[in-house]
Amino acid sequence: MKHTSRAPLHLLLVTDGRTIPNWLYKCLQAVEESKVATVVLALLAARTEGRTLRHVLFSLYERIDRSLFRSDADALVPIGLQSALPGCRVVNLRQTALVRALEEAHIDVVLDPFCLLPDAGLADRSTYGVWSMPFGHSGDPRTQSTPGFWEVIEGRPSTETRLCVQWKGYGGKHLLYLSVAPTDRRSVSRSKSRLYWRISAGLARNLQRLAADPDAFVQRLAASPPSDVADTPSGGPAGAPGNLEMLQAGTRLVRRYASDKWMRTLYREHWTLAYRHGRGDRPATGPFHTLVPPVDRYWADPFPVRVGNEYYIFHEEAPLSHYKGTIVLSVVDNAGKTAGPIPILEKDYHLSYPFVFQWDGEFFMIPETAGHHRVELYHCVTFPSRWKLERVLLSGLAASDPTPAFVFGKWWLFAGIPVSGAGTSVELHLFYADSPLGPWTPHRANPVKSDVRSARPAGRIFENDGQFYRPAQDCSRRYGYAVSINRILQLNPDTYREVEVDKIVPTRDPTVVGVHTFNVAGDLTVIDCLVRRRKILTKPWRHTLQLDGVGQRGWTDAAARVSRAAPPRSHSSVP
């Protein structure tokens, strides 16, 4: 059956009052302005119960929390329904005229963002079913009914939400979009706000895709997995904590705040580099030697290149006084002797993540220039110190950690792109081209991943026995907490799938609290580490450290063997 959509799509919005939150208003405003959809009917479906005296402390906490931690991009600001949707007809769920109103409106999509409808309610009265946004972790009804609260109180590193579709003939809810955002350590409202902005962008994108190609949307829905979240109403009283639970939760938050202040008083944190020679069963575990920067700056994002018996490590250097990064070079030989760093590239804007690669016998570099809102390609004039701007690959894009790779016969560019209002975490976007010079075409499913645990790139993609592996940052517990190693399962202009096979975590050395870049050249493995040191040092800091891996062992020597399994020189992303 061929599906054709009207322009614009007719939407029914299910809400529980005469206001809607800012994140939903901005989403609906975006699709209205793009002329892909319009809300023609608003359905008032009040919750079954209200808050009682048993939840008075929770209600008080919500107001105080929003007052203390409100940001300019507050997703929770209430917007009047009449002002947000002036041309929309409002009906009540219990009105006898509801059925007639639905027939007259010819609804394409029912939006039930707060999961207020009964199971399968209205799924057969719209062309493309009921779209809902259940929050929380699978198997935990508390997190589903009180968005963001228990994740913050219990110190869970991430918070989840989904965009699900229930449509006649498909049975149950199917997953269209999953977003995993970092949990704020102190504030529920701030944590929720960042997550709501993600789902706002995801909802708008999916409505635009439906309007652009209904047949492709139907095929995608048929192939989508079933949702594993129970139908628990978000924000309902069943999951709201009682007064005694709130007293316990408040005690936890106070203790956490005091602990954070105490740690910042005693310790300073900065990024440093670490390396190890040799190939082991697990290349990212064991003893590493450190390259320690001066106390007034940090070093990060190392990319090694082997030339003869020496390893040239291109990396970021940034003074702690202003954090404007430049690209510098340190050298390590086979005997472990080091030299540098020497300046390589400096601009008026921040530079980091110097992705150095070889193509057609020449060296190129794509540094991160996200603050300048473009992706730049540099060509090496004289190795290793002279570089010139070859061209701008992408403009108007704040791309974090751009990572090119030649995979499955095509050049791909992996990059982290932020969501407005959602904090510093990013979603993974893909672009493809016939050569690293471009032109670069966006992947049709962008963003291909919205998961703070493994979206942001963390180094070169490497190959072993025909399998490709993508290092990614786990920024759930903090920025740059760990490196996730992901095996690429499927990659083409329409689809991207990967699975995590290992994780490099800072568990064995108490002075190391983060690892966020992993690269290999020859028999040298280089990482960067977030190191915690006392502000008043009583003895010199150790220059060796230990790291662990915690995943499967199927990929173990893949990175160590990458230099032996490299593709032809003109296609090599690892010199």
Image (cartoon, rainbow, N blue to C red):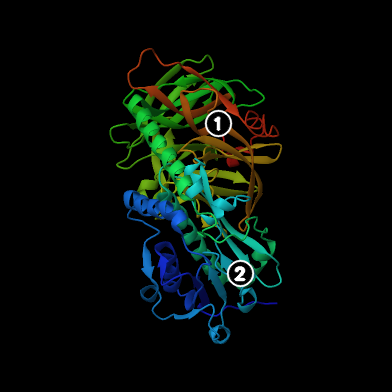
Identify the amino acid type marked 1: Val
Q: Is residue 165 above or below residue 317?
A: below
Residue pointed to by mark 2: 118
- Which residue, as the protein is rendered here, is positioned at the far top? 539
Q: Is residue 290 above or below residue 477?
A: above
Horizontal and vertical percent position of residue 342:
37, 26
Q: Is residue 164 above or below residue 569?
A: below
Horizontal and vertical percent position of residue 138:
62, 51
Closest to the observer, 465 or 451: 451
Q: Secondary structure at mark 2?
A: loop
Residue that appears at 44% across and 36% down: 380
Residue 559 is at least partly visible in this image: yes
- Indicate the quadrant where residue 104 lies: bottom right
Disc 2 + disc 1, Cβ < 8 Å: no
Horizontal and vertical percent position of residue 564:
66, 30
Horizontal and vertical percent position of residue 326:
36, 35
